[in-house]
Image (tube, rainbow, N blue to C red):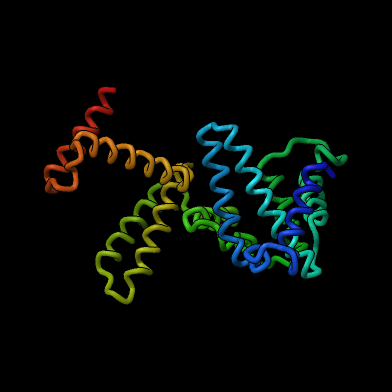
Amino acid sequence: MSEQLARLLSIMARLRDPQRGCEWDVAQTFETIAPYTIEEAYEVADAIERADMADLRGELGDLLLQVVFHARMAEEAGCFDFDDVARSIADKMEARHPHIFGDEGGVMDGKRWEDIKAAERAVQGSTSTMDGVARALPALMRAEKLQKRAARDGFDWPDHDGPTEKLAEEIRELHEADDATRQEEAGDLLFAAVNLVRSYGIGAEDALKAANAKFERRYRAMEELADGNFASRDLHGQEELWQEVKRQEREG
């Protein structure tokens, strides 16, 4: 074990010490720390997107701390420790790459990778294609993963027409829904939209992320054109600014 990793594990043990530790750290549970773990993973992704290597180094440290924190709490509960975590992922990576660490040879294509993962799920007692799709994933990402799992069983539209018609159907149903069913119909609409986007080979999460960035960029540009008076304009005036921003983008 590296000197710095041993140091980090020692720091966490001290922070969690019931007598000498930090009150906040001692009070935490898996459930209270989980949101921080998710947040740190997103901050790692953000640093990568900005190509900020100095920030990435720090964010990876923050994410590693989350792993150490969870492992420490598990060790205290007598479940497993950090070494067990490292051993588990090392065993998994070797098992998932038999062409590298085994004697099978060949190439690791998508089908082979999925077959190996399916075999892992079977060993763990999986009984459904849907097993193993984490419930804590962002809803948009989880919808896409569920649809991809179903598609592997052949439960998928053969072309773009099916999901296109389904999306139009869900739009109508949302429009006609009453208060009791509106949220359900809204969910069906979003699920259908993910399915249509996926049929074009586009990741829904990536597409929406790009759309968010574009909207934010254009909105900031409108505010700048309005010189601090954007909110005071009526909708027609705001729309004129929106079209002006789009025109400027087209003209470069």
Percent of width and height locating residue 150: 56, 58
Q: Quadrant of the C terminus?
A: top left
Task: Say which residue appears at 15% left-offset and 38% top-offset.
Answer: 240
Can you give x and y, in whole percent of width and height, for residue 101 in the image? 84, 40
Residue 197 placed where, x, y %? 42, 47
Quarter of the image for residue 99 reads top right
Q: Nearer the viewer, residue 229 or 194?
A: 229
Residue at the front extreme, as displayed: 20
Residue plotted at (55% across, 57% down): 137
Residue drawn at the location 59% of the way across and 57% of the way down: 153
* 56 w.r.t. 93: above or below: above
Can residue 198 be seen in the rendering of this structure?
no
In the picture as drawn, the residue positioned furthest to the top comes out as 252
43 over 167 or under it: above or below: above
Residue 58: image x %, image y %?
Answer: 62, 40
Along the horizontal axis of the image, is 211 left or right of 205? left
From this viewpoint, which residue is outermost toward the bottom?
180
Along the line of sight, the residue nearer the viewer: 198 or 162: 198
Q: For residue 175, which quarter of the picture?
A: bottom left
Report the side of 135 relative to 81 (left or right). left
- Residue 145 visible (yes or no): yes
160 horizontally vs 121: left or right = left
| Quadrant holding the N terminus | top right
Left or right of 139 on screen, residue 125: right
Q: How many marks?
A: 0
Which quadrant of the figure has residue 180? bottom left
Residue pictured at 66% horizontal, 44% vertical: 61
